[in-house]
Amino acid sequence: MMSPSRALPALAALLLASAVAAQPTHVMIRARSLDAKFIGAHTGGVKVTLTDSATGRVLSRGLITGGTGDTPRIMKAPLTRGAPLADAETAGFDAVVDIDAPTLVRAEAWGPAGKPAAAIRVVSELWVLPGRDVGGDGWILSFPGLVVEPTAAPGPDGVLKIGSKVTMMCGCPIEPGGIWDAATFSVRAELLRRRKPIAQSALAYAGQTSQFASTLAGVAPGRYTLRVTAAETGTPNVGVATLPVTVTRQR
């Protein structure tokens, strides 16, 4: 049987070894708008929580912030395997997790935080090894969707002027002939009463970057919900937003 004088140093050595085994490991998290650039400060960033998938223990929390990235590199240059998309200015969150064994890490990301009506939640998992940093482009989470921000202005004779700003999730602009060509986006408005559509119209590019507009005629006084949808041809990207509208009788 080990004497107390020998047991205490042995126990201390064991505890020290356990403490040393846990290694701070860097994991770079980025969020990229599908078919576009990285989501960062321009649209309020992305909130991220990393947890141990097996135990639910929170490993790190933070905000993806920074620039949207280099447009030519991301959207114009031919993709080459292994070539980085991000640079030092590109939005990211450098999470540090303390793990002492291979860990299946769960990332839950919500954003763009500055556009809460358009924000979505993305969840992914990745095995992380102690001391093996995930750097460079890092762990890129894909955010499909569009940011849709509608407006409505009732006018005389039951005419309702409808407008909407539509951008990618990164805030990237939509315009004729641009990288995100307005001709490849379908924007539509529906006027709902008691959840039933009573009128609809296609919105056309309104002459300013990311702006679309239309009018609805013959709208009777009352309370309505305006629903605007936008979809990008060739991708799953869709955005939906609603707006309460009150039309009053004109005098």
Image (tube, rainbow, N blue to C red):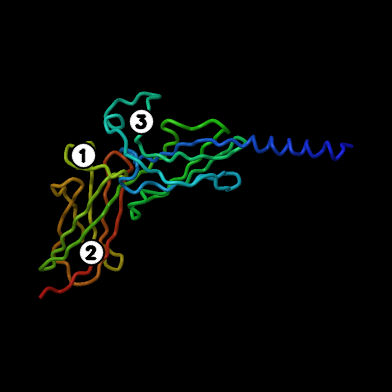
Q: Quadrant of residue 172?
A: top left
Per the rendering, the mark at residue 181 is 1
Q: Which residue is mark 2?
A: 198
Q: Secondary structure at mark 3?
A: loop
Q: Which residue is mark 3?
A: 85
The amino acid type of the residue labelled 3 equals Leu
Q: Nearer the viewer, residue 60 or 20?
A: 20
Work out whether mark 3 precedes mark 2 in sequence or the reverse, and give the earlier one: 3
Residue 103: x and y in percent read: 58, 38
> CB atoms at circles 1 and 3 under 8 Å apart?
no
Image vertical order of residue 212 relative to residue 156, above or below: above
> CB atoms at circles 1 and 2 under 8 Å apart?
no
3 vs 2, front mark: 3
Mark 3 and mark 2: Cα distance apart in space: 46 Å
Residue 3: x and y in percent read: 87, 38
Q: Secondary structure at mark 1?
A: loop
